[in-house]
Amino acid sequence: MNHYWNQRFAEAEFAYGEAPHISLAEQFCTPGSGRVLCLAEGQGRNAAYLAGLGYNVTALDFSEVGLQRAQELAARSGVTIHTLQADLSAYVFDPEAWDGIVSIFGHLPAPLRARVNAQLHGALKPGGWLQLVGYHPKQLEYGTGGPQELSMLYTVDGLKAELGPGWTYDVAELVERELEEGPYHRGMSAFVHILARSQQPVTSNQPL
């Protein structure tokens, strides 16, 4: 599988474009700060964008070629990002390490996806945020990108169940809109978009 992604990311044109995913750009469009982890980040389009807003960004991916292209894009954009080559099937999330986590089209086999998603709350600092986008089963009708295996696709309710308790959802919806993201994401698309925040723990000086 790593060979597959290395081949795709080695192509001259960026596989999914150089601009951030539209939902991320719409939600995050003003300067920010804090440590952000971008999962399955590929060639770095979302990481470079967030770094340009002022975030301290780490792009994690299985593909070393993808991460090389991510550094190329960051340099061309005049920003700095950190890269981390890791296999999510073995990666251990440090507790309360991140102010934000981004997962854009990070499609994984269903058991692994559930295991990863269940760890995201604990990896965020209290009050941290999660921006997650994944193709919905309706995407199979459009055929404009994404995996063809139903079990790898997202529903709102299924994703909430995998994420577990302790979240406040600012956005949790099925989106159908045109995408123009490189050669592999083009046309009308159906995806789940979630923006959630880790709930602050109740302390002794807070009213119950």
Image (spheres, helix red, strand yellow):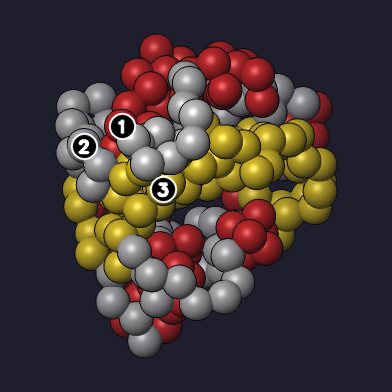
Q: Given contact means CB atoms under 8 Å apart, are the residues at marks 2 and 1 in contact?
A: yes
Tell me the CA gap for discs 2 and 3: 12 Å
Q: What residue is drawn where x is 30% and y is 67%?
A: 56
Q: Position of residue 64 (x, y in %)?
A: 23, 52
Q: Is residue 201 above or below residue 109?
A: below
Looking at the rendered structure, the secondary structure element under dot 3 is strand
Tell me the SS state at disc 2: loop
Residue 192: in sight, yes or no?
A: yes
Give the residue type at disc 1.
Gly
Residue annotated with mark 3: 128
Q: Residue at x 34, y 81 (%)?
A: 79
Total marks placed: 3
Between 122 and 82, the residue placed more toward the observer is 122
Q: Which residue is mark 1?
A: 122
Instruction: Specify whether residue 109 is in view.
Output: no
| Mark-to-mark CA distance, 3 and 1 | 10 Å
Q: Amino acid at mark 3?
A: Gly
What residue is rendered at 35% in x and 19% in y? 115
Q: Identify the residue under disc 2.
A: 95
Check whether the beta carbons of the residues at disc 3 and disc 1 lie within 8 A of each other.
no
**Closer to the camera in the image, 179 or 36:** 36
Name the amino acid, label 2.
Pro
In this view, 94 is above or below 45: above
